[in-house]
Amino acid sequence: MLLPWEDLHRMEGDLPWAALETFADAVVDDPALAQELFAEYDRAWQAGDVPTYVDLYVPAIFALAAPRLGDRQRREIGDFLVDRLLEAGPEGADLTEGALLAACGSLGPVVLPKVLDALEATKSSYHSIAWSRCWDLTALALETEDAELRDRTIQACVRLLEQIEHGPVEEFLGIPAAWTLALLKYADAVPLLQRLSQECSRLSGGVDYQEAMEFLLGQSDLVPYERLWERPVRDWLEGNWRMVREQHAQRESEKSMAEFDEAKRAPRQSGYRPPEQIPVTPPIPIVEHPPRVGRNDPCPCGSGRKYKKCCGDPAKGQTANV
């Protein structure tokens, strides 16, 4: 089957929904295609500053295909997505993290063992937003009937909140775990949530821990916040895609301005020569010549004598003007 790979790399035009749906159908029919999409994602991610939407498109393809995939394929895709979610953290790629999180959640509780393994491996040494988003995925425990998996999720959430209570982990990072305990109706968490609500500042999680506790106790009608994967793929992808497009446009504008400024500051090339100047001819001095006096003319001195007998007389040491 000929797939529209070029549409995954096209930067112009609208979001290529038809191409994404074609890939999703193909993943369902050909499980081996997932490996090609993994490689495509990694190539785009390693490209660094090269503008691309591939890191949004690949997770979206898996999310579109998720309802029709078997557990084995979901686990394989989930392993890849969870690893990339944690790797995205240090880069601060919020929009990429959102796409990965939504795709992970769309695969369902089958990915939860991988999520818990990853969280336990990193423990409190990896306090990124991506790490916190992985804790969002613990809410998938609500969808499983596996009692052992639910218990493992509860214990992981309790350990995290105990770490927050004693300081190693920042307060706000435990909010998703607190809500998972509340949604799972784990009553033993009430004292811990109460202490956190009192000890943490309002801005860093105190209010959230209190709301989770009240929900657990049935004292609040507050509806827990909607998980990203609970929204239609079109909703979260469209929003992320538009924001990435704006980021690319802003970077291109900044790049153009930087190149313009650099060109203005650049020194002249070594072969540069100033335009030749037109030579200026110095002015010819004006010399006044006395009128010509003949030898027999009256002497100009006014003596009344002939010039040859007066001023023009050689005997007087004068030179005739002839």
Image (cartoon, rainbow, N blue to C red):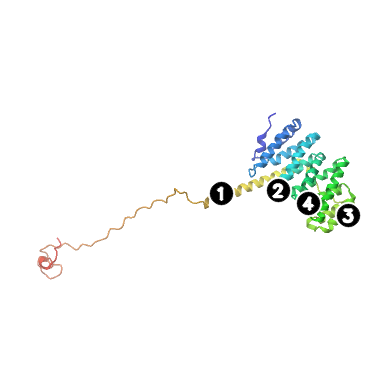
Asked whether residue 6 appears in the rendered view, the answer is: yes
Q: Determine the CA span between mark 4 and mark 3.
A: 19 Å
Q: Nearer the viewer, residue 99 or 302?
A: 99
Answer yes or no: do the residues labelled 2 and 3 have beta carbons within 8 Å?
no
At 66% from the left edge and 47% from the top edge, which residue is drawn?
247
Mark 2 vs 3, N-terminal side:
2
Q: Position of residue 33 (x, y in %)?
A: 72, 32
Q: Residues within 10 Å of mark 4 (few under 14, many from 20)?
A: many
**SS of the residue under disc 1:** helix
Splitting the image into 4 quarters, where does residue 315 fall? bottom left
User: What residue is shown with label 3?
Assistant: 191
Q: Nearer the viewer, residue 143 or 20?
A: 143
Residue 259 — which label? 1
Splitting the image into 4 quarters, where does residue 73 fall? top right
Q: Determine the CA span between mark 1 and mark 2.
A: 29 Å
**SS of the residue under disc 3:** helix
Q: Is residue 219 left or right of residue 57?
A: right
1 or 2: mark nearer the eye: 2
User: What residue is shown with label 4?
Assistant: 173
Q: Determine the CA span between mark 2 and mark 4.
A: 15 Å
